[in-house]
Image (cartoon, helix red, strand yellow):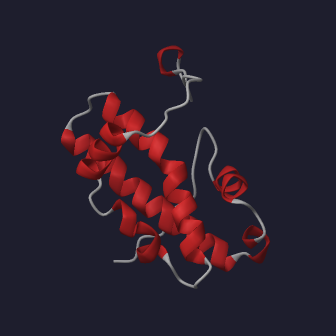
Amino acid sequence: MIGKHDEAEDTAIIGNAENDAALLAMCPDLPEWPQRWQMESDDLLIGKQIVEAFKPFLWHLIQRGLAQKTLKRHRDHLWMLGGEVIRRRQDDPDLKSLSVPELLSELIDAETGPLLIVVL
């Protein structure tokens, strides 16, 4: 639930060299995420679009000045989320027809996200 002090800002974050450098410092393997999530050839483009959709949130986290451990935890959760979105898209043919914004909107809401299955 979004509290009084947690309201989302309506300002758009536009990438620049400084933001990109901070992002790569936080997530040095970010450009490789789509390849790591890929199950089929068409997943690569979707994975790249998912990364682009995640970037504003990652920039927001960096700008908040959070501790490195907290940033890494959020980064790792986003990596898992992207992989789960690709997996769900593979398992559900109806999801394959959705654009990335529609796909993310279908699987993630303000309160919850998909239950991640962790195999030990």
Residue at image position (41%, 75%) is: 36
**Observer able to see residue 116:** no
Residue 26, horizontal then vertical, whole percent: 26, 49
Q: Residue furthest bottom?
A: 40
Residue at image position (72%, 60%) is: 99
Residue 94, horizontal then vertical, whole percent: 79, 71
- Quarter of the image containing the N terminus? top right
Q: Residue furthest left?
A: 68
**Observer able to see residue 64:** yes
Residue 72 or residue 23, whichever sits in front? 23
Q: Is residue 67 above or below residue 103?
A: above
Q: Is residue 66 above or below residue 28?
A: above
Residue at image position (49%, 35%) is: 14
Residue 18, horizontal then vertical, whole percent: 30, 38
Say which quarter of the image contains residue 92. Answer: bottom right
Q: Is residue 41 above or below residue 77?
A: below
81 sits to left or right of 95 = left
Residue 34, horizontal then vertical, whole percent: 47, 70
Q: Residue furthest top?
A: 4
- Quarter of the image containing the C terminus? bottom left
